Image: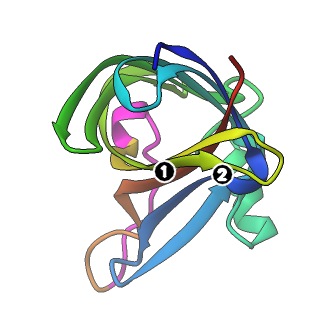
Amino acid sequence: MAKSQWTVDSTHSSIDFSVKHMMIAKVKGTFQAFEANIVADAHDLTSADIQITIDLNSVNTRNNDRDAHLRSADFFEVEKHPSLIFTSTAITKTDEGEYALIGDVNLHGVTRSETFSVTFEGAGKDPWGNEKVGFSATGSLKRSNYGLTYNAALETGGVLIGDEVKVSIEIEASHQG
């Protein structure tokens, strides 16, 4: 199959994250609004062009006060930096249906190269004859690399918020020709 345009089905896709809290538990959240531009041969991602834009205002950790704090100048500073943008720069096949996706992450005015592990989950036609594909991706970002350094020391030692943010992405996309 040749490279072609794919449109993300947002009702069957998600971008989730987790971060250590008090060094003993994890806080999980999701971004409810994002867009992706994917031009790819779904069965061989090595030549794909992928750009994902996340609306940081859409952060949802199931706690309104925490979400407002994440949008503030202590973290995302959404008034100045409303989006996280990922742009692929290289994709290598690591195994059958497995890839290393390297790309530039632009967050909080900082751009850094990051690598995500991607799995091709499969392809098929929905009941209306539309060609669909599924991918999952995992990786992690160090928030301090992007100037997101807000924290508080704990009385027992350690810090309130971990530096490593684990990212999990599930994408279902429709072929656009």
Numbered circles on residues, count: 2
Q: CA distance from mark 1 to mark 2?
A: 30 Å
Q: Is residue 106 left or right of residue 117?
A: right
Which mark, residue 53? Answer: none
Seen from the viewer's position, the closer of residues 93 and 158 is 93
Residue identifier under label 2: 13
Q: Amino acid at mark 2?
A: Ser
Q: Is residue 31 left or right of residue 86?
A: right
Residue 140 image offset from top left, x and y in percent: 34, 49
Q: Secondary structure at mark 1?
A: loop
Q: Residue at x 45, y 20 (%)?
A: 1
> Crowding at label 1, few (<14), some or many (≥20) Cα neighbours within 10 Å?
few
Q: Residue at x 73, y 51 (%)?
A: 126
The vertical placement of 111 against 158, above or below, is: above
For the record, the magenta segment spans 144-155
Residue 89 image offset from top left, x and y in percent: 34, 14
Which mark, residue 150? Answer: 1
Q: Quadrant of the C terminus?
A: top right
Seen from the viewer's position, the closer of residues 153 and 55 is 55
Please tell me whether mark 1 or mark 2 is closer to you in this view: 2
Residue 73 at least partly seen: no
View extreme (left): residue? 94
Residue 10 at least partly seen: yes
Q: Quadrant of residue 69?
A: bottom right
Q: Residue at x 34, y 48 (%)?
A: 139
Q: Secondary structure at mark 2?
A: loop
Seen from the viewer's position, the closer of residues 36 and 70 is 36
Q: Are marks 1 and 2 in contact (CB under 8 Å)?
A: no
